[in-house]
Image (cartoon, rainbow, N blue to C red):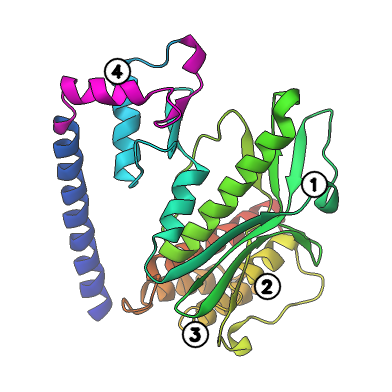
């Protein structure tokens, strides 16, 4: 009964939040009058405003810019200083946006993003203009250091794969997109908010496995699931994802791993339900619950690809 009540309250709170967001969207949209839009249009293609893939062709029409600017504002982006671009008619958050959000996050200091040389983490494939770039994003928060890595390590490849289509600027563009993705990962780690990022500025940016996330803090190593020899790479990658996770999260992660080993759907369902009962007071609870859900879905996908 208690669980049912909690789920009911959660559903109602989500409904209230949804309605509040919908009302905010309407009010923001109504404020974008023709006069306001003329000012926003003047920022299009301006180095002090925002860039598009049609800057050399007169830019986008007012309604497209309105919708993209609205979505950018809902993410908390500025309409200046190139914090978003318009690519193929869609809004795309940039490296500048994610770095600013990280630097302005409460308690955060010393945000750093570094990339390894391409030939240090994998030679660019000239034929397909494909680059595998390793690197890390780091910061300190309340005296702790947080590091988000993307590297080839222990047979797990979490480097960022970037495909570019302009040979003259391929490497520079690839490095810029890799820095942006690392900044995005750091922001998601700090905020617990997973950013829907469909556009990548004319390139496809993908991650072969989740980033390895390390906290140089007092997290106990007993919270980390034991590594099993010979397990699939996707499981090892998820172990790295939950490295140093809070003690409230680790038991659920272990149960998902046990369910994967025994191919027990009921055990997996039970672990998923248990993840919903993680205390509301846990910092970044939403992020951890979402990661556990995605891990469970990855297990089901592995079962379907590798039947007994």
Establish if 200 lies above or below 153: above
Secondary structure type for disc 2: helix
At a point 56% along the width and 75% down the height, the residue shown is 145
- Residue 213 is at least partly visible in this image: yes
Label 2 vs label 3: CA separation? Answer: 22 Å
* Quadrant assignment for the N terminus: bottom left
Secondary structure type for disc 1: helix
Q: Is residue 177 magenta?
A: no
Label 1 vs label 3: CA separation? Answer: 37 Å
Sequence-first tag of 2 and 1: 1
Answer yes or no: do the residues labelled 4 and 1 have beta carbons within 8 Å?
Answer: no
Is 213 placed left or right of 168 in the picture? left
At a point 61% along the width and 89% down the height, the residue shown is 222
Instruction: Assess disc 4: are there few (<14), some (14-19) or many (≥20) residues with their C-alpha within 10 Å of its C-alpha.
Output: some
At a point 84% along the width and 31% down the height, the residue shown is 126
Q: Which residue is mark 2?
A: 261
Secondary structure type for disc 4: helix
Is 39 placed left or right of 192 in the picture? left
At a point 24% along the width and 73% down the height, the residue shown is 6
Q: Which residue is mark 3?
A: 247
Which residue is more in the foreground, 227 or 60?
A: 60
């Amino acid at each position: 009964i208690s669980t049912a009540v909690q789920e009911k309250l959660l559903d109602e709170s989500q409904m209230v939040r949804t309605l509040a967001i919908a009302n905010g969207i309407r009010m923001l949209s109504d404020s974008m009058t023709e006069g306001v839009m003329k000012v926003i249009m003047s920022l299009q293609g301006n180095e002090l405003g925002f860039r598009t893939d049609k800057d050399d062709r007169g830019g986008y029409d007012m309604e497209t810019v309105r919708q993209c600017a609205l979505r950018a504002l809902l993410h908390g982006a500025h309409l200046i200083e190139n914090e978003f671009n318009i690519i193929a008619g869609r809004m795309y958050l940039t490296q500048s946006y994610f770095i600013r959000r990280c630097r302005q996050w409460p308690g955060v200091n010393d945000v750093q993003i570094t990339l390894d040389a391409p030939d240090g983490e994998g030679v660019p494939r000239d034929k397909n203009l494909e680059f595998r770039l390793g690197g890390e994003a780091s910061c300190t928060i309340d005296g702790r250091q947080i590091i988000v890595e993307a590297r080839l390590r222990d047979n797990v490849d979490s480097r960022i794969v970037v495909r570019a289509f302009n040979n003259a600027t391929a490497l520079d563009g690839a490095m810029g997109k890799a820095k942006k993705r690392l900044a995005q990962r750091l922001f998601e780690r700090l905020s617990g908010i997973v950013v829907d990022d469909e556009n990548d500025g004319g390139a496809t940016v993908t991650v072969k496995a989740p980033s390895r996330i390390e906290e140089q803090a007092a997290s106990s190593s007993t919270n980390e699931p034991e590594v099993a020899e010979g397990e699939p790479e996707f499981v090892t990658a998820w172990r790295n994802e939950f490295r140093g996770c809070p003690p409230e999260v680790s038991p659920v992660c272990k149960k998902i791993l046990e369910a994967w080993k025994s191919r027990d759907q009921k055990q997996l369902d039970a672990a998923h339900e248990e993840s919903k009962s993680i205390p509301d007071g846990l910092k970044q609870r939403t992020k951890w619950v979402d990661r556990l859900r995605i891990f469970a879905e990855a297990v089901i996908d592995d079962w379907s690809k590798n039947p007994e």
